[in-house]
Image (cartoon, grey):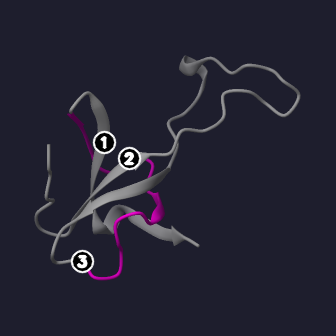
């Protein structure tokens, strides 16, 4: 399914963090916070400084979670994007 964000929004897939610590301790899913790093999947036509495939950091409480083809994504306003990871 194709999704084209409208307005000044981007579609993001959260980047999963490792589930074990460096010492080998496994962290249960309910004890972790959701990651604040994501990969841009789609960008509205109004945004020129972010591209598909960019890794971004976004605001902790920003965006709307949606489900497309059994995958979870986040639709973010451009104001919720804090920066691009290089």
Q: Earlier in the sequence, mark 2 or mark 3?
A: 2
Labelled pair 1, 2 in contact (Cβ < 8 Å):
yes
Q: Identify whether 35 is placed above or below 83.
A: above
| Left or right placement of residue 81 versus residue 8 in this view | right
Q: Identify whether 2 is placed above or below 86.
A: above
Quarter of the view holding residue 41: bottom left
Q: Earlier in the sequence, mark 1 or mark 2?
A: 2
Residue 72 coordinates in the image, percent (x, y): 31, 35
Mark 2 surroundings within 10 Å by alpha-carbon count, few (fewer than 14), some (14 through 19), many (20 or more): some
Q: Identify whether 29 is placed above or below 52.
A: above
Q: Quadrant of the C terminus?
A: bottom right
Mark 1 surroundings within 10 Å by alpha-carbon count, few (fewer than 14), some (14 through 19), many (20 or more): many
Give whichever of 16, 62 is nearer the camera: 16
Residue 13, which numbered label?
2
| Residue at the spot of label 3 | 47
Distance from label 1 to label 2 (Cα)? Answer: 5 Å
43 in the magenta segment: no
Q: Residue at x 29, y 68 (%)?
A: 78
Give whichever of 76, 16 is nearer the camera: 16
Q: Residue at x 56, y 20 (%)?
A: 29
Give whichever of 20, 8 is nearer the camera: 20
Labelled pair 3, 1 in contact (Cβ < 8 Å):
no
| Left or right placement of residue 24 versus residue 50 in this view | right
Distance from label 2 to label 3 (Cα)? Answer: 18 Å
Q: How many marks?
A: 3
The secondary element bearing badge 3 is classed as loop
Quarter of the view holding residue 6: bottom left
Mark 3 surroundings within 10 Å by alpha-carbon count, few (fewer than 14), some (14 through 19), many (20 or more): some
Q: Quadrant of the N terminus?
A: top left
Q: Specify the segment rendered in magenta.
A: 48-68
The secondary element bearing badge 2 is classed as strand
| Residue at the spot of label 1 | 73
């Amino acid at each position: 399914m194709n999704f084209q964000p409208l307005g000044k929004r981007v579609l993001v897939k959260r980047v999963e963090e490792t589930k074990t610590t460096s010492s080998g301790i496994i962290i249960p899913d309910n004890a972790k916070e959701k990651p604040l790093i994501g990969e841009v999947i789609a960008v509205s036509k109004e945004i020129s400084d972010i591209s598909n495939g960019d890794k971004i950091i976004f605001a902790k409480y920003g965006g709307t979670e949606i489900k497309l083809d059994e995958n979870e994504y986040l639709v973010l306003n451009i104001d919720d994007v804090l920066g691009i990871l290089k």
